[in-house]
Amino acid sequence: MGDRWKGVTIAAGTAALVSVFWWASMPTVGQAPGAPQFTSYKAPRASDGHPDLNGIWQALTTANWDIQDHEAQAGPRPELMGAYGAGPAGQGVVEGNEIPYQAGALAKRKENFEKRMNVDLSHDATWHETGDPELKCYLPGVPRATYMPFPFQIVQGPGNDILMAYEYASATRTIRMNWKGEAPIDSWMGWSRGRWEGETLVVDVTGFRQETWFDRAGNFHSDALHVVERYTPMSPYHLLYEATIEDPKVFTRPWKMSMPLYRRMEGNVQLLEFKCVPFTEELLFGPFARRPGPQR
Amino acid sequence: MDRRFFTAFGLLGAGVAIVSLPAVIAQGPGSPTKTWIPARTAWGDPDLQGIWNNATSTPLQRPDQAGGKQVLTEEEAAEFAEDLAHGLTRDRRDGGAAVDVNRAYNEHWMDPKRLEITADKRTSLIVDPPDGRIPPLVPLTPERERRRLALAEATRRFNDGLPHSHLDGGMPMRCIIRTDRPPYLPIIYNNTFQVFQSPGYVVIQVEMIHSARVIPVDGRPHIGKTLRQWLGDARGRWEGRTLVVETTNFRGDDGAVYGNADPETFRIVERFTRVDANTIDYTFTVEDPRTWTRPWTATIPWNKTEDQLYEYACHEDNYDMVHLLAGGRAREKAAEEAAKKAR
């Protein structure tokens, strides 16, 4: 249980003391992630004796556009893309909606957003300087992988490792259960160490590279990023996902996001391929191609 | 074979091997030992989990030096292994300046297991046909011949340092598919696979390029015919303790299907059998009446490893793609200027 939902429970309980009628007519509680009616849920056990998280899951949020509250907006090239490129409105997934950036970091976020479509691979040293990694089909990092608008599959067997396979970019990530020691290497998806806390899979992720973003709005971090994720089954059909973000180089304090993850229920559901490299090559490499007419 | 990939690294013909002798499989070095009690998962499926490495120096096709022998004696094998390792090692400095520069990409970066022959001392990974060679090709249709030539021309441009665009680079250089497309063949490095299992699934995570091949073993039908994928659509079933995987729905892009086979008629069946605690026998059979004159089969041992898989982020830092393209443009410009001066 996240503190946020404990708060909801307490608030609801207080309200119930004041007025049972008010309590009975509080439909919004039922739609919140980890809503009170599911607090007693205990998931079936998997072969490892822990809650069974096996399945194909997907977030149903607009957090990939912006993890904070955001209005619907035109896409970056409306004269070309029309409404196709537009982004949906959404309520943020950040607790309290504020991201505690250090002084100066907010300007970097703004610059990221303004230059999110700017790509220039002319120099290795500045290769990653501008442009949303998603635009370039780069690995999404954590937690962004979780709420990309694509499903992902959790494979939890009897072994020591749990696999998370994401449809987006064929990204994968191994959760090493009870791994002791530091991340041996920095990577886009980080180094994930898992443990069980009762009904919750807790994943501690470090060893990140700095290039991934949280969303298309340019929210960012450094290589000091430390993410603690919590996956808690709330019903047979949904998990509560919570991620605590810590980065002493960019934020003044840890902050938290949460959202439900829904089980994909189609009888024939499976991960398909979204190998997006071919969709971005012309953008990235086109400037270096031989073209008809005078060469650059 | 991803011919362009190997050529790009000057490794054409390097230790890629596959084998498939049903007879060898039954009795070969990978055969079940009497003391091995096949492990099973809690829900009763054979347990293939773990991290595996498929590197070997045994070539896919039997070399002439094997003298037609399928399996070597201890003594013959030692010499065979030494010859192969000598040919493959990149720490030699006896090839002249150009070769020497190429070998600067030395053993430090390579998988040392690729310098060892298979434990069963076979001379080729191909076990069928009996000559250990890929069967002769059938004549291509004019359309496929045209496409093959176009692909060869793109490869030539790329190898000459004059690629027109990223498309001339081929799938591995473009970081679209590498060793993750079946059949699984060993390569110079990153030959690691991790197998995960959960009820109804076997999942193979392949280091290059960080993809997970999710194989349902629950009897469900394949996805719709119009849904093509780079890695195809895999379905598994258990035959005794062997996982049998059939994969369909491959994309039709040039170079997308193994051996440039025709995705319409290409068939691949892979068989994974754990023969002891530390070995999986991986056997695949491919056929395509529009490509090869007969089906052929190879067997590659997967050896358990204590290594971990690490993230192979290929596309993210594919600096060389830009270097190669920019180099091509620079060469063109230099040639234009030289031509001007000559006038």
Image (spheres, rainbow, N blue to C red):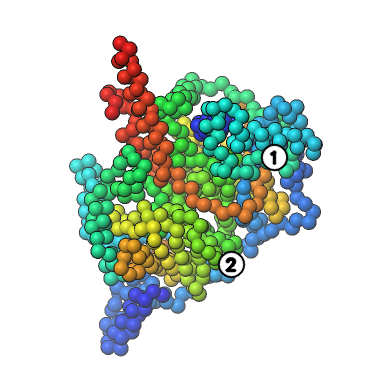
Is any part of residue B108 visible from this angle?
Answer: yes
Residue at the image point whose x is 22% and y is 44% from the top:
A77
- For residue A178, side relative to residue B167 (left or right): right
Q: Amino acid at mark 2?
A: Asp
User: Chain under label 1?
Assistant: B
Disc 1 residue type (three-letter): Ile
Callout 2 and callout 1 share a chain:
no
Which quadrant of the rendered structure holds the N terminus of chain B? top right
**Quarter that holds the C terminus of chain B:** top left
**Which residue lies at the image location 43% right of the left edge and 27% below the top edge?**
B161
Q: Which mark is drawn over residue B117?
A: 1
Decide: is A217 above or below A200: above
> Is A271 in front, or is A119?
A119
Give the CA distance from mark 2 to mark 1: 37 Å
Q: Name the spot of residue A142 as percent of width and height, x first.
A: 40, 58
Q: Label 2: how many residues lie within 10 Å, few (<14), some (14-19) or many (20+)?
A: few
Residue A45, image x, y percentages: 55, 70
**Residue under the point 24% across and 60% down:** A104
Name the residue furthest top. B343
Q: Position of residue A10 (x, y in %)?
A: 34, 82
Q: Chain of mark 2?
A: A
Q: Which mark is residue A48?
A: 2
Q: Nearer the viewer, residue B2 or A9?
A: B2
What residue lies at 32% left-to-right and 38% top-to-bottom? A122
